Image (cartoon, rainbow, N blue to C red):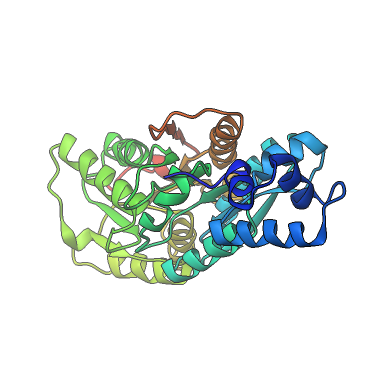
């Protein structure tokens, strides 16, 4: 499977590729009936011009890359988009961003819109319950497609992910190393999405490595800040409550900070996955497993640009951006004697 080319259109109409180019670029004289036949052939064959190549030839700066993210309000994805834009702007490319609101239906609608606009490349942060088999033909036809933060579902494609499992394991192991034996987990459950699944598994890996039993009573779901705060309150109300908490995303971390502050609990250790603005000025300052969203964006842009520059290998490429533990105080609180 391949995309129809300008030569295919020329053969269909019985004209030269130069004539097709003149019609496409509105550059030079073409008879009206010939123009109509060329445009009809383009529609019939489903021809989409190579906008990147065209823009390189004519020096235009309006080629676009489409980016689908789950949430506009999440600072993590804003920083990812910034990393992409910084890298592609220097190449004369415009980044167009749309939010799927974490729904597969809206994600597919945005992708269809970007394809209709004939973007030069497509970048997607998959939403929950996504299926990307509908993009196999586009990838086979040569459209650069890169997935960020989470791999594609139902197809092999270039992707950039953080060390979610490794980072979660390191964060929980840090609490174990401070003497904690009952460590609560607050995050998105059920853990069906790639990042949620990996971080939850990292939590379990750390417990197993330390010889600690997995206790389902210490696991609570909290998708947003309010739900995470309520989840922490439930954990603290247990007959045998946790002495430490691992918050599996930035919203869960914010909810945990609020719940502990309102309860006046300064004796519960906390490690969060993802850094937060002003984390250093909290009391105590928040210990985190920090991702590098700008590096994720830059790495994804590197994959896209290499495809646009002619990197034609069919094999999907994977880039792994490591996390780092940032001890600040909250994760170093010891358990009660």
Please identify the quadrant where the C terminus is shown. Answer: top left
Please identify the quadrant where the N terminus is shown. Answer: top left
55 up-or-down from 106: above or below: above
Query: Is residue 187 or residue 43 the one in the foreground?
Result: 43
Q: Position of residue 190 (x, y in %)?
A: 27, 63
Dividing the picture into quarters, in which one does residue 318 lie?
A: top left
Q: Position of residue 96 (x, y in %)?
A: 67, 55
Dividing the picture into quarters, in which one does residue 16 lie?
A: top right
Please report the residue visible at 49 percent of the width from the left and 59 percent of the height from the top: 254
Query: Is residue 245 or residue 46 the one in the foreground?
Result: 46
**How many badges with numbers are in the image?**
0
Query: Is residue 110 or residue 279 the one in the foreground?
Result: 110
Left or right: where 306 falls relative to 131: right
Is residue 246 something one can see in this rendering? no
Q: Position of residue 235 (x, y in %)?
A: 28, 65
222 up-or-down from 18: above or below: below
Q: Which residue sits furthest front?
A: 14
Please report the residue visible at 29 percent of the width from the left and 51 percent of the height from the top: 197
Left or right: where 61 falls relative to 181: right
Q: Position of residue 47 (x, y in %)?
A: 59, 53
């Amino acid at each position: 499977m391949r995309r129809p080319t300008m030569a295919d259109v020329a053969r269909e109409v019985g004209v030269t590729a130069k004539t097709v180019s003149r019609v496409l670029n509105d550059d030079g004289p073409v008879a009206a009936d010939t123009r109509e036949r060329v445009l009809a052939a383009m529609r019939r064959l489903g021809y989409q011009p190579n906008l990147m190549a065209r823009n390189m030839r004519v020096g235009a700066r309006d080629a676009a890359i489409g980016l689908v993210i789950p949430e506009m309000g999440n600072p993590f994805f804003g920083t990812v988009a910034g990393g992409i834009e910084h890298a592609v702007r220097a190449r004369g490319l415009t980044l167009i961003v749309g939010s799927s609101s974490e729904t597969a239906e809206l994600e597919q609608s945005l992708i269809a819109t970007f394809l209709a606009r004939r973007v030069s490349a497509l970048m997607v942060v998959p939403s929950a319950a996504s299926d990307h088999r509908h993009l196999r033909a586009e990838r086979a036809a040569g459209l650069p497609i890169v997935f960020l933060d989470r791999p594609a579902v139902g197809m092999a494609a270039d992707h950039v992910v953080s060390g979610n499992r490794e980072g979660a394991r390191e964060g929980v192991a840090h609490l174990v190393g401070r003497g904690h034996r009952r460590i609560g987990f607050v995050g998105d459950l059920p853990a069906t999405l790639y990042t949620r699944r990996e971080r939850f598994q990292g939590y379990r890996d750390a417990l197993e490595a330390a010889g600690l039993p997995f206790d389902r009573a210490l696991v609570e779901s909290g998708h947003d800040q309010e739900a995470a705060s309520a989840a922490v309150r439930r954990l603290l109300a247990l007959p045998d409550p946790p002495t430490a908490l691992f918050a599996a995303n930035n919203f869960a971390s914010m909810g945990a900070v609020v719940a502990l502050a309102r309860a006046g609990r300064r004796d519960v250790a906390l490690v969060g996955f993802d850094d937060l603005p002003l984390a250093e000025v909290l009391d105590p300052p928040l210990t985190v497993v920090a991702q590098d969203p700008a590096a994720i964006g830059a790495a994804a842009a590197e994959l896209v640009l290499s495809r646009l520059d002619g990197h034609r290998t069919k094999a999907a490429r994977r880039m792994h951006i490591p996390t780092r533990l940032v001890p600040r105080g909250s994760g170093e609180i010891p358990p009660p004697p």
